[in-house]
Amino acid sequence: MNDSGKGRALPPIIADIDWLSSDSPERGACKAIQLEERSGLQRLFAEKMRDTDLDLGRGEVILALLRVIDAKARPFPGEPPSSTERSDAHRTLAVGILIRLYDDNDELYPAGIRARRSIVEQKLGIGWRDTYPTRPAFLKVVEGYLRFVDRTLADHNRVEIVSAVKKELRRQQDERPVSPAPALEPSAPEPTPGLKSGALGPSRKLKRNRGIVAGGGALAVVVIALAAWFALSGTNSNSSENASDTATIPMSDAATLERLYDGKDPRGTEGEASHCADPPPSEEVVSSHPPVEGPDGTRVGTIELRSSPKCKAVVWGRVLWNNDPAATYQIPRGWTLHVITHRPDTRDYFDQPEPSHDSPIPYALSAMMSTARGCVFVEAYFTDGVRRTASAATSCVSA
């Protein structure tokens, strides 16, 4: 592992848009249940709607909010934008088309992403090449979307927005087909409240996330926030416990730590100087434990952050299969697991890919990164070169 492993990793909000924009008929924002796993969108809305009674852990609520925001962008004229506000509205509509919401006639946009990109170009004047999430030009689309969301969900609009969301939820309920109630069977157990069929556990109401960077403000703030936005927002009331004295480390020492540890394997495979763990045993860092989705769409593991009693101000991650350090997992043929360590403050990140093997593998490790110049978080997803699963990302912590 070395600096050649440094690469491009999509920030969570862009990863969500990318995932929902898939050609797969099973994806798209119109599939409300899938929105419950889109942490980027959940966190985007959590701070702005924190003082409301909307349950942002429910996919139906997120879908209703997406549709209300999309509707707010529609009154702007269709001609090419001549102002920032109108331009942001166009970009908001573009996101709605790409993630497959509904058109002016309340019909779903086409399932094929090529057809949706063509609609964006013809209707909004945004070139189809600019609608690929991996292209730098797409950042402008996301920046405009975030600005529009920030204005739409501003405090003085909140009562109106909540009312519109609840109205949309009632409309969804009215349009939902009613199935006849099954006959009661006295021996059947009472279902667990909130447990979806085939789900791993009860759905959870999203807690208020602290530390979210506001969508408004200077453009430079939005650009920087795209990389760190939701990793930082994952910091909860334990954030004070995550803080360390690394902020007092001199810059010269920070640079030394980064040269020593950044991008290295914690097991010391590149020399004893960067040997931080196993032995000695590593220690868990207080952080979130996001679920990792496998290529088949099921939950296969979680990300856990680790630190070392031996190495100062260093964090790395590991993907545990079924939350068990002793468990193994067979990566499907043709797929690769990417475990990426990020330091938002310096915009550095290191990708540690784990390709498929003939036999199951134990937990997967990320590269180490020093926290001397900023917090670190870890992201994980699978890809086969064409398709990719949703990104999972921990909160951003210091050691």
Image (cartoon, helix red, strand yellow):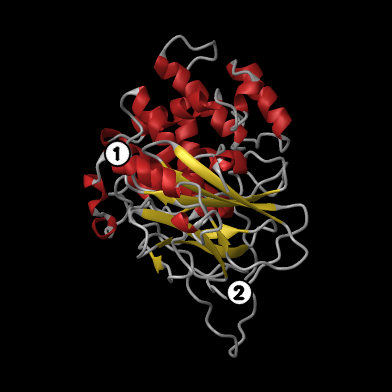
Pinpoint residue 336: horizontal percent, then vertical percent. 68, 52
Q: Does 150 sit left or right of 122 as displayed?
A: left
Q: Nearer the viewer, residue 192 or 393?
A: 393
Q: Nearer the viewer, residue 326 or 99?
A: 326
Q: Would you say the residues marked 1 and 2 are in contact, meaning their CB atoms lie under 8 Å apart?
A: no
Q: Does 105 sit left or right of 65 as displayed?
A: right
Disc 1 crowd, CA 10 A, few/some/many (<14, 14-19, 20+): few
Residue carrying label 2: 327
C-alpha separation, residue under disc 1 versus residue under disc 2:
41 Å
| In this view, 270 is above or below 179 | above
Q: Residue furthest bottom?
A: 187
Q: Quadrant of residue 187?
A: bottom right
Say which residue appears at 43% left-offset and 71% top-offset: 281
| In this view, 184 is above or below 99 | below
Marker disc for residue 252: 1
Say which residue appears at 58% left-offset and 18% top-offset: 124
Q: Quadrant of the C terminus?
A: bottom left
Say which residue appears at 60% left-offset and 63% top-offset: 299
Marker disc for residue 270: none
Where disc 2 sits, the SS reads loop
| In this view, 102 is above or below 209 | above
Pinpoint residue 279: horizontal percent, then vertical percent. 46, 70
Say which residue appears at 44% left-offset and 29% top-offset: 72
The amino acid sitting under disc 1 is: Ser
Disc 2 crowd, CA 10 A, few/some/many (<14, 14-19, 20+): some
Where disc 1 sits, the SS reads helix
Q: Earlier in the sequence, mark 1 or mark 2?
A: 1
Is residue 88 something one can see in this rendering? yes
Q: How many numbered marks are there? A: 2
Is residue 44 something one can see in this rendering? no
Judged by depth in the image, the label closer to the viewer, 1 or 2, is: 1
